[in-house]
Image (cartoon, helix red, strand yellow):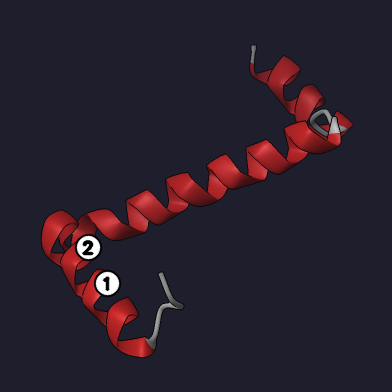
Amino acid sequence: MGRLGTTEIIVILVIVLLLFGGKKIPELMKGLGSGIKEFKDAAKGEDKPADSKKEEENKQ
């Protein structure tokens, strides 16, 4: 396996666009981004900030 070139990346993006459609891609990327952020926070061992905890308590 070699490196991915520009042509291969374009072909992959076109296939993804055809499979999921234009409306679903932003939702998928948002979910992927939040999942990566949660993973990084868990790997660092960080909890939610104190402000977030206070907001959650106020909502209940």
Is 22 on the left-hand or right-hand side of 34?
A: left
Q: Position of residue 42 (x, y in %)?
A: 75, 31
Using the numbered discs, state the Cα–Cα distance from disc 1 to disc 2 in whole angstroms.
5 Å
Q: Residue at x 60, y 46 (%)?
A: 36
User: Where residue 39 sits: x, y (%)?
Assistant: 66, 37
Looking at the rendering, in which quadrant would you find the N terminus? bottom left
Q: Residue at 81% of width from left, 24% of height from top? A: 54
Looking at the image, which residue is at 47% across and 48% down?
32
Name the residue: 76% across, 38% down: 41
Placement of 19 over or under 37, stated as above or below: below
Residue 47, image x and y in percent?
83, 28
55 displayed left or right of 12 = right
Q: 40 or 34: nearer the eye?
A: 40
Image quarter in which the C terminus is found: top right
> Which mark is drawn over residue 13?
1
Above or below, 45 against 41 in this view is above
Three-letter residue code for mark 1: Leu
Q: Work out whether residue 8 or residue 55 is closer to the camera in this orientation and state it.
A: 8
Q: Would you say the residues marked 1 and 2 are in contact, meaning their CB atoms lie under 8 Å apart?
A: yes
Quick check: 49 above or below 53? below
Three-letter amino acid code at disc 2? Val
Tag on residue 16? 2
